[in-house]
Image (tube, rainbow, N blue to C red):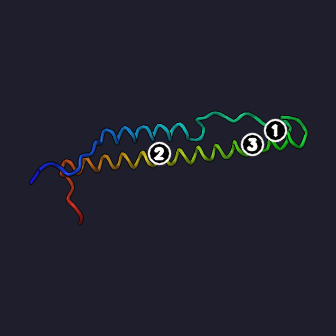
Amino acid sequence: MSTEPDLQVDTDWIRRAAATLQRTGEQFSPGTGGPLPSVGSYSLGTSAAAIEVVELVIRRGSQARDAASALAVIATTIGDNLLRTASQFEHLETGLTRGPR
């Protein structure tokens, strides 16, 4: 019977992945991308088409910021969970867990 562990986990790689996700979260956090250009209803002229394009740009800009903010939260959460997972694997490897209570 083998005494080798059944599962080997490279926690260094898990921590690297977590760091990458956390940096990604920081990059997509609100306020890191700079302000959107100032656009007003008549920035492209007074025609109905021009006004519609400007309104679409404003809506899409807002949606893009909301999506980036959500991505920041997701990336940071996954990064935090990966760090916690790496720590738990290391804890198990050292035999410090006591098992279920």
**Spatial distance from mark 2 to mark 1, Cα to Cα?**
34 Å
Q: Is residue 92 above or below residue 15?
A: below
Q: Earlier in the sequence, mark 2 or mark 1?
A: 1
Tell me the quarter of the picture where residue 43 sits.
Answer: top right
Which residue is farthest front? 1
Mark 2 crowdedness (10 Å alpha carbons): few <14, some 14-19, many ≥20: many
Query: What's under tag 3, amino acid-wise?
Result: Ile
Q: Is residue 39 above or below residue 7?
A: above
Horizontal side, residue 19 vs residue 40: left or right: left
Query: What's under tag 2, amino acid-wise?
Result: Thr
Q: Nearer the viewer, residue 82 or 2?
A: 2
The residue singled out by tag 1 in the image is 40
Which residue is farthest bottom? 101
Horizontal side, residue 42 vs residue 74: left or right: right
What element does badge 1 sit on? loop
- Please state the horizontal and vertical placement of residue 61, each as a whole percent of the image: 69, 42
Horizontal side, residue 6 vs residue 55: left or right: left
What quarter of the picture does the C terminus occupy? Answer: bottom left
Q: Nearer the viewer, residue 97 or 8?
A: 8
Give the number of the disc on residue 58: 3
The residue singled out by tag 2 in the image is 76
Query: What's under tag 1, amino acid-wise?
Result: Gly
What element does badge 2 sit on? helix
Which residue is farthest left? 1
Could you tell me if the residues under marks 2 and 3 are in contact, i.e. CB atoms within 8 Å? no
**Spatial distance from mark 2 to mark 3, Cα to Cα?**
27 Å
